[in-house]
Image (cartoon, rainbow, N blue to C red):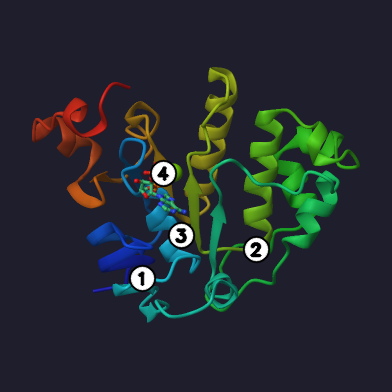
Amino acid sequence: MAASALGLREIDAFYGDSHILQKVSFALGEGRLLGLLGRNGAGKSTCINVVVGLLPARGGTVEVFGTDITRLPPESIAARGVALVPQGRRVFKSLTVRENLLVAARPPGAGSRHAPWTAETVFGMFPRLAERRHQIAAHLSGGEQQMLAIGRALMANPRVLLMDEPSEGLAPQIVADVMATVRTLKESGLSIVLVEQNPRLVLDIADDIVILNSGRVAVVTTPAGLAREGIDLTQHLGVY
Ligand SMILES: Nc1ncnc2c1ncn2[C@@H]1O[C@H](COP(=O)(O)OP(=O)(O)O)[C@@H](O)[C@H]1O
Ligand SMILES: [Mg+2]
């Protein structure tokens, strides 16, 4: 069987004495999009932090294309083709749009098939950013900052893209633009984990669905499976 693009196996993670992730396991197939759902505080961002090496797991393993990356520092994990669009965007506010992209650039690693991303190809994808390339990021709208955060992740030429609530705090039309971008990236062959609180945003784009509840995997299914298995989303996700 082909190795997964990303696999978490029995991950335990703590903040201090708080046991946050409890034996979390799931796998992202190559070229697939996994919707990681769960209410606020369920542990979604903690999973992402473990994958990118910001929070060391106390137990379990993380593999990227069959290579164990569990004990690697963030820089080495990035070099293996894992990039993050962080929750809250986190662009460098005092740098220009173009500078934000250039400081995130990293050559493609082994196994990368896509033509390397450059500031110009990112601008081709996001014409709004091209128009604002010399403005500082602090002057961008929330939607433009989200596009920039996605562009920064692409500049690292990832094979696995982790997107942590990219729709958070954006107007519906901008959310639709962001989701269209996610779809384009998926069609380019990227393997994607899309973290969301709102299942409606992921059901028509995800191949696989994982629902976290209080730091545990509560459901592993597909969008069709959610309906077929009669899974009560309100129970797992609250009101949405
Ligand atoms: N830096 C931190 N220190 C201590 N506890 C944290 C920290 N970050 C998150 N938590 C706690 O870990 C749990 C999971 O948080 P998080 O992974 O951010 O949830 P989600 O992304 O699903 O909203 C929550 O109970 C949260 O309060
Ligand atoms: Mg979060």
Label 3: element kind? helix
Q: Disc 3, ligand 1: is the CB inside 8 Å? A: yes
How far apart are labels 3 and 4 at the CA level?
A: 12 Å
Q: Position of residue 180 (x, y in %)?
A: 53, 33
- Circle 1 crowding by C-alpha within 10 Å: few under 14, some 14–19, many from 20: many
- Kindly indicate the quadrant of the structure image that contains residue 223: top left
Q: Earlier in the sequence, mark 3 or mark 1?
A: 3
Q: Nearer the viewer, mark 2 or mark 3?
A: 3
Q: Nearer the viewer, mark 1 or mark 4?
A: 1
Q: Nearer the viewer, residue 73 or 146?
A: 73
Q: Earlier in the sequence, mark 2 or mark 3?
A: 3
Q: Quadrant of the N terminus?
A: bottom left
Residue occupied by mark 2 = 156
**Residue 195: image tag:** 4
Q: Nearer the viewer, residue 226 or 36?
A: 36
Q: Disc 4, ligand 2: is the CB inside 8 Å? A: yes
Label 2: element kind? loop
**Residue 49: image tag:** 3
Residue occupied by mark 1 = 57
Q: Earlier in the sequence, mark 3 or mark 4?
A: 3
